[in-house]
Image (spheres, coloured by chain):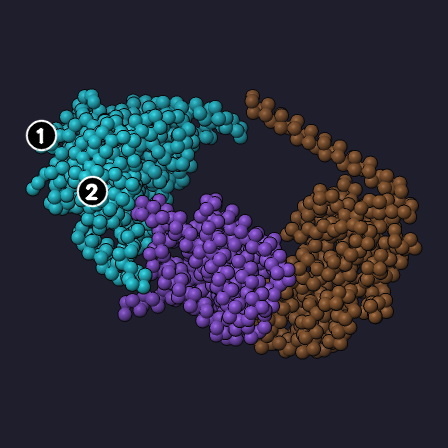
Chain colours: A cyan, B purple, C brown
Amino acid sequence: MSHETVLSVKGITKLFASTRALVDVTLDFKAGEVRGLIGENGSGKSTLSNVISGQLHPDDGTMELHGKPYKPANNVDAKNHKICMIVQEMGTIDGMTVAANIFLGKEDIFQNKAGLLDTKRMNSEAARILKEIGVDYIKPEALVNKMPFEDRKIVEMARAMYLEPEILIVDETTTALSQKGRDILYDIMAKMKEQNKTVIFISHDLDEVMSKCDSISVMRDGSYVDTLQVKDCTPSQIRQLMVGREIGDEYYRADYNHEYSDEVVLECENINAGILKDISLQLHKGEILGLAGLTDCGIHELGKVLFGLITPATGSVHVHRDGHTAEIKKPITAIHNKVGYVSKNRDQEALMLLSSIQDNISLPSLDMLKKGFIIFPKSEKELALKGADQMQIKMRGIDQTVMYLSGGNKQKVVLAKWIGNGSEILILDCPTRGIDVGVKAAIYRLMEKLKAEGKSILMISEELPEVIGMSDRILVLKDGEIQKEFMRGPEVTESVIIEYMI
Amino acid sequence: MGKTKKYAVSALKGLALPVVVYLIFKLIRPATFGTPEALYIIAQQAMMVTIMSLGMCCNMTIGIWDFSPGSIVTMVGLICGYYFNQYGFWAMVAAGILSGILFGLINATAYTVLRVPSVVVTVGLMLIYESYGSVYKGGKGVSITREAGILGQAPWIFLVTLVMLIILYVIYNKTKFGFNVKAVGNNELIAKTAGINPRVVKFFSFFIAGCYFGIAGLVNLSYTTALSPAKNMGTMSVTFDAMMAGFIAIYLSGAVNRVFGIVIGTFTMKLISAGLVAIGVEATWQKVFVGAFLLFFIGFTQIKAQVNEWMNRIKRAKQVKA
Amino acid sequence: MKKLLALAMALVLSLSLVACGGGDSSAAAGGSSTADDLSQAVEATGEKVKLGIIIWGTTDALGRNSTMMVEKLVQQVGGEIVIDSSYTSPETQIQSAENLISAGCNAILIVNSSDTMLPTLGKLCEENQVYWGLQWRDVISPEIEEQLNTMEYFVGNTCEDETEITHRLGMAMADAGVKQLAMVGNPVGDTTHDARWQGIVDACDETEMDLVAQYRYQGTSGAPACMEAVESFITGYPDLDAIFLTGGTNSTLEGALSALDKHGKRGEIKLACVDFIDADQMKEYLEDGTLFAIAGGHYVDPVFTAAMLVNAVEGNRLSDKPEEINLQFIDFQSADDAVNYYDYVENDADGIYAYTEEELGMMIKSINPDLTMDGLRQMAADYSIEDVMERHGNA
């Protein structure tokens, strides 16, 4: 198998206002390899992939494709050069069929002489592609909005694969996918490699990158650092390159004690809702309680029930605070009793993307801020500034729109809003989803700090290392039922827990 | 077999609405309401609005608000009447088609060039068209002979509508343009990254709408045989009729194709207004009923989902106890 | 602090504007009070008449010819008219009046869409010292009438007995054997149409005739709307005998006829209405029996209020209080009636109308010094086909 250079990036620089997103980046991509691209948020890896896929134009530098100058005018032009990208938050178009989504913008290929579209051929062609990538259970004529989220992501992959790309860029797609979706994507990547094509794989999950890639290019602060062959390096080596300092294994909690008060602050009894069957649990003051399980085992629904977002068929949720008890039936009761909730779907459920950082942070605290009927802008700003400062949000200013922040910074805004509100209990659903190591570590430190202050945290996560690394106590769910309870300790390992999950 | 059955079920779902409306009025007035002759008249009434609403279909899918259709229909009617009186029947038909194309181009160009929200553009154009109507050829209003109004009489009025319906069905469901309309309407950003030019799609959407309004104007004049210029947004009520039919079609779109939903929508609207007169509702209250119906109908799907969820919870609780 | 300052500045600025406005109007008051001083004199004050007319439109027969007559009248004293048709509701008629006043009109003639807007309009005219009067309208509400009577610049109104004429037409229909009647009219609140509506309701009460169905236009009337209403009647009431339109202009009558035609009911269902339409069609419809009866001819109505206004502006106001002038409707049930009417009273083809320019001059005191209020009133009361033929039958 030849490993000749397919794409060379030479001296690319990209500026956003005064920020230097990319500085003189030079690297090569080879045929027949899966190249990992890794770096902290703001390191420039997404900017680089956007330059390659034609969505951004570099301020300086050149690119060469198969030795010829390559200067894509836009992403359509890039596609014509057989360079395709699957992105994290892209999506399909509702109200249209799977086939129509796959061939979006390419409908002409099915036009007959009368200028009409041959929908039959369109469907059979779509079926062929879906079968090729191993998902023939998805029907070409089905409407995408009636399909689960993960299948829609697969339709996007099919859209990219139809063009038979030479270079496929996968940008943080896996965070949104379940194991099934990931496996399909990995298969596609393996197949591309077999056909001597190139895959550029961007992910936050270092373990994933290590296991799926042949080589890894590391970026930091807009600059290219180095490319390492996976077989000759270790995760800690790469982490070190990413942050430019030693992180070591001080990532999770170092201690193994599981001390927390006996005082129960949040509890539920005999919850039946959707998949959940007869769930009862208690969260104590100063406790970090981990909820572990597969995506669809009910852990995410349980978080919503506890916050009052889902009304259970039977059972009740109670919060205890300052000697009085309240039943949570609606989120407003939860908020009044200082319960905060961080959703898994950050962009849809946790943030007002078009509003400023300030507006997002102060939202749950408006009641607290108002004097009579009036909220003074000054006190709102103070609260937001304090929160932003505490969380070390990287921003131009407090009035910046949340939409354009990186994933890690967005999550910091979400956390700042509940901490600013003085929440005593935090329900965190996948708090580190789609976030790079630096911010991840910051969130873990924050959790420890909150615990030390006597606050209680319910952490729902699909990532076992962090559940094991952070929780005082772990509840494992399977098919909506609690299977097992673990106390923190060195004997609790991934392999032990997985037994109960699957 | 499976396919036939599927089509039968969806047809039944779509027709449920007019049937229910019909039965309500029939129950109140069993003797006089809804005789076959009466339904035949109501069907003829619905045709002009159907053509208008078909024309608005693409724009509504894209999410463009167009308030000019009624004024175009009136203006085209006046032009057609003038050409009939000057040059005869075929000149009238040609005038209808050509002026529709012209207004379509004006609308499309104004929207694409000015880049202001569609509401602003089309309200402005509506005022211009209406005012131009009242100065056009002295603004006296026109009338044509009954014989010249053949396109407004059965069976021709049905044939014209059917042709317009088939054309739109093909455009909407079987062409690249139709696919692009749906893509731009649902998510412009994704459509753009897929290489679709939303501005081009919107331009043609407006253009097709204009052509349909031209035909609607011709049919309208043929149907009424007389027309006077409107002013002060007097054309809005017919625009709203067509829009409401479009809304009904959107809500029926789970069961029947948008294009057929529009026909059901216009027929239902006309059935309601005829029914309210027939059961002797006092004049002022008729509009209240129409408004209440729409609110109820559009709110219905929402309520249905809530009731479903509630029922499911009760069922589940019972299972748990058992 | 800056904001506060800005706010204060804005306040001061707007107050000063109000003050300026006040200054202006007091100046105008001075000007016209001189006119008042001279009001006893027979001589014209020399103020040029600029008459603002608020009317639905001037494209239909009624709107076109009435405005034309008023214009001819005003031209007798070298004045001009300004037309505003931009209103959509009683409230926006006030805006129309404001527009006309700021355009320099010194008199306003309005066909008001409701009674309730009159006190507001009156106040506006009093403040600006502009004479005003109503055409085709009577004031129904006694409270409002009382208010108007105290207003210095309100000259009065000209109206027809709307209830009486529809009652007369209604009785004629009952006599002709009509049992089931349906009616179409403008939205409730239009005083003229309400009065006409009432006449038919009264006639139904007094006879065997039943008002079985009714329809009021939503917003504006027109052929399509009227057609839809008539079709609804046909579909709902197979035994319907007659349809009455409280207003036949704006192509509504044509719309109704189209509907009857289309569904084979022409001649079978009798049609009657108020307001004349274009001559040729009316003759034809009366001849072939499609039209059972029609009343109108009141296009001359605005002339009388306009005459009161012109005299007032010129300083020769005929009465020191608001006056009401009553005009007779002309109604016909046969084509012969129509022939004479269209030869002598409203002949667009030959330009012959109810009053010649000379006759119009007789309504203005600066031209006809012998004119009195009673004299003007009598001219309106005498209005009929015969009256017109007598005055200039051979013109």
Quarter of the image that includes the N terminus of chain C? top right
Rendered residue at 26%/56% (across/down): A109
Name the secondary structure under disc 1: helix
Rendered residue at 35%/33% (across/down): A404
Rendered residue at 20%/46% (across/down): A165
Inter-mark Cα distance, 2 to 1: 25 Å
> Sequence-wise, which precedes: disc 2 or disc 1?
2
Decide: is A14 above or below C362: above
Residue B313 shown left or right of residue C272 in the figure: left
Q: Is residue A255 visible?
A: no
Marks 2 and 1 on same chain: yes
Label ID, residue A168 = 2
Residue B65 shown left or right of residue A167 in the figure: right
Q: Position of residue A215 (x, y in %)?
A: 13, 34
Tag 1 residue: A232
Decide: is A200 above or below B40: above
